[in-house]
Image (spheres, grey):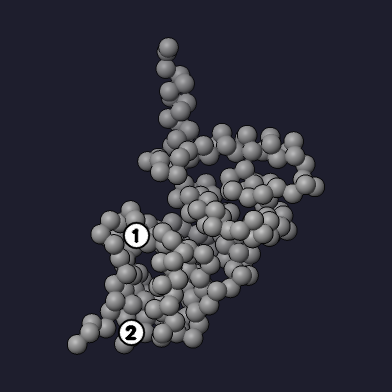
């Protein structure tokens, strides 16, 4: 007899699935790594955080599941329960979505997602090192056409100048090039760090650099 739960996980949490939640003000929050369990009988997905300080979360298959590249968005009936799952590759994300599609009629790939549930929530929280890393990796999966389209969305939301130096996007010939270069230099000073850095935030990395620069030669 088969177990009603299929576990989607790996031995090393660092190569596993990450998840993000929303607080009561609808701000995106990075919540770490997790394991997933698909319950075919109960028709729900369980998100089990690696960090035991977080409680397991359930996502019912009657909710809406939308895949965009390596990210799976879960839209709950109550917005505060919305979830974002981030997979190492698009292939793994698609595999999980296919499992969910067996029990749900609300799974899809929605191109409008960039504007509605990626653009604003992620951009507003780019000072968080992990969210910035996820956003960069996500954008790198875009085609040139998709990057330009996303850049246009940012312009329409008056976010382009802030985000352009931080994410791997393409500029527009009509942009004020010098203004963008100045912004790029400024933002790089604020956010300069490697994706695999052990610093918990760009501010921590900057503090360390300042301390090093003050040491007598």
On residue 46, which mark appears? Answer: none
Quadrant of the rendered structure where residue 189 is? top right
- Residue 183 vertical placement versus 7 (above, below): above
Earlier-in-chain disc, 1 versus 2: 1
- Asked whether residue 56 appears in the rendered view, the answer is no
Q: Confirm or deny contact between disc 1 and disc 2 (CB under 8 A).
A: no
Q: Is residue 180 left or right of residue 129?
A: right
**Marker disc for residue 16:** 1
Report the front residue among 74 and 57.
74
The structure residue drawn at horizontal position 53% and vertical position 77%, both measured from the top left corner, is 108
In the structure shown, which secondary structural element does the residue marked by tag 2 occupy? loop
Mark number displayed over residue 40: 2
For the C terminus, which image quadrant? top left
Q: What residue is rendered at 48% in x and 72% in y?
A: 74
Above or below for 145 versus 61: above
Instruction: Determine the residue located farthest toward the left in the rendered image.
Output: 1
67 sits left or right of 175 in the view: left
12 shown above or below 183: below
Residue at 62% x, 43% y is: 165
**Residue 1 visible in the picture:** yes
Q: Position of residue 200 (x, y in %)?
A: 40, 43
């Amino acid at each position: 007899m088969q177990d009603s739960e299929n576990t989607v996980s790996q031995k090393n949490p660092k190569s596993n699935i990450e998840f993000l939640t929303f607080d009561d003000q609808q701000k995106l929050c990075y919540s770490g790594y997790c394991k997933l369990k698909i319950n075919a009988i109960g028709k729900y997905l369980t998100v089990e955080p690696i960090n035991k300080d977080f409680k397991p979360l359930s996502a019912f298959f009657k909710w809406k599941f939308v895949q965009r590249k390596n990210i799976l968005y879960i839209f709950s009936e109550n917005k505060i329960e919305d979830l974002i799952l981030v997979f190492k590759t698009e292939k793994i994300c698609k595999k999980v979505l296919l499992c969910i599609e067996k029990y749900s009629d609300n799974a899809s790939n929605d191109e409008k997602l960039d504007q509605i549930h990626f653009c604003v929530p992620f951009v507003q929280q780019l000072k968080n090192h992990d969210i910035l890393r996820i956003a960069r990796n996500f954008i790198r999966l875009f085609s040139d056409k998709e990057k330009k389209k996303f850049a246009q969305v940012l312009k329409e939301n008056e976010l382009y100048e802030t985000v352009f130096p931080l994410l791997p996007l393409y500029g527009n010939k009509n942009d004020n090039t010098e203004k963008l270069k100045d912004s790029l230099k400024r933002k790089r000073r604020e956010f300069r760090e490697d994706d695999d850095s052990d610093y918990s935030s760009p501010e921590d990395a900057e503090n360390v650099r300042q301390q090093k620069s003050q040491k007598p030669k």
